[in-house]
Image (cartoon, rainbow, N blue to C red):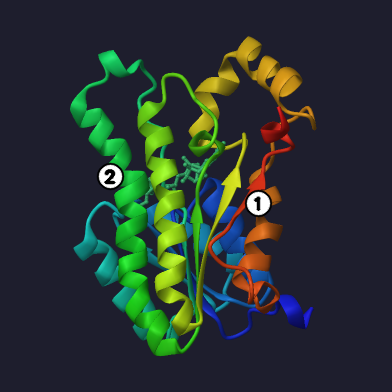
Amino acid sequence: MTLFDLSNKAIIVTGGNRGIGFALAQGLHQFGAKVIIAARDEKRNQQACDAIAMGSERVLPVTCDVTCLDSVSSAFKQAEDWAGGLYGCIANAGGRGVGCALDEMDAMAWRTTLSTNLEGTMNTFKAAIGPLKAFGEGRLLAVSSLAALHGSAQFTDYSSAKAGVEGLCRALSIELAPHKITVNCIMPGWVDTDMNADIKQDKRLFESIKRLRVPLKRWASAEEMVGAAVYLMSGAGSYHTGDTLRIDGGYHIG
Ligand code: NDP
């Protein structure tokens, strides 16, 4: 238990009000962390905090749009003041993009996907570095995607953004190693969340992904992302940096 103990460690989770981010926030809280949920929808942020803690003083909702550095910096300031120091941050906020062929893709749609997934991760980590250095050690974790590795037709924007997240984390892990700050990614495969609601509705596509592409023959639940995140965020992961853990039911094997 001590290996994974996060008592007195304050961790911000962007996009923590639902889906994978909510599961991660809840998991970190169960291991003792103070958790800050940062996303755009204020009401949903509050509901997520209530669902996690029910009266505990170890959760804080903050409103934040990761595409805007000022908004992210102000969220980090609130979080730092509340917690008395920040130990970690999970850049989870993201979205899959528009889903169309590149020659038909509107330039603005491309930019929006890159802005949320890649620039959003950069803004989040940029705001985190000062507080984590001040804390004396820390953990940065980004939520990448299998789309960064595998070609994903109709999602060139999303694949590019997530491949960028991987590069960002590898480079940053070297910059921050002297400060005892690790930087890693988790790479989920198919996870059953709102982001994939449209694909789930297409029963044929949903079944074929499960049967033909995933050796474990099912999609993941958001909760199945928690173990890897707790490992990388806790003392157990102290010598692990610049890496990506795939959690994809074996999809990458082919
Ligand atoms: P959801 O759509 O369920 O949740 C997305 C979260 O991101 C919400 O909390 C949303 O909150 C937040 N968010 C979106 N845009 C912004 C923004 N500009 N600023 C702040 N918060 C934002 O998605 P998932 O839980 O499925 O995905 C979470 C992460 O996991 C994403 O990075 C996604 O790319 C990645 N991923 C998901 C996979 C899957 O199969 N589901 C597979 C691989 C990776 P709000 O709208 O209130 O801002």
* Disc 2 C-beta below 8 A from ligand 1: yes
Q: Which residue position is annotated with label 2?
A: 115
Where is residue 7 drawn, in percent x and y?
Answer: 63, 83
When asked about the image quadrant of residue 129, the answer is bottom left
On the image, the x and y values in percent for residue 121 come to 37, 55
Local packing at callout 2 (Cα closer than 10 Å; few below 14, some 14-19, many 20+) is some
Secondary element at tag 1 = helix
Q: Nearer the viewer, residue 168 or 127?
A: 168
Labels in figure, total: 2
Residue pictured at 28% horizontal, 64% vertical: 72
Q: Mark on residue 225?
A: 1
Q: Is residue 93 visible?
A: no
Q: Is mark 1 within 8 Å of ligand 1?
A: no
Q: Is residue 110 above or below residue 77?
A: above
Image position, residue 247 (x, y; %): 67, 45
- Ligand 1, by image quadrant, is top left
Q: Is residue 54 visible?
A: yes
The amino acid pointed to by label 1 is Met
Residue type at tag 2: Ser
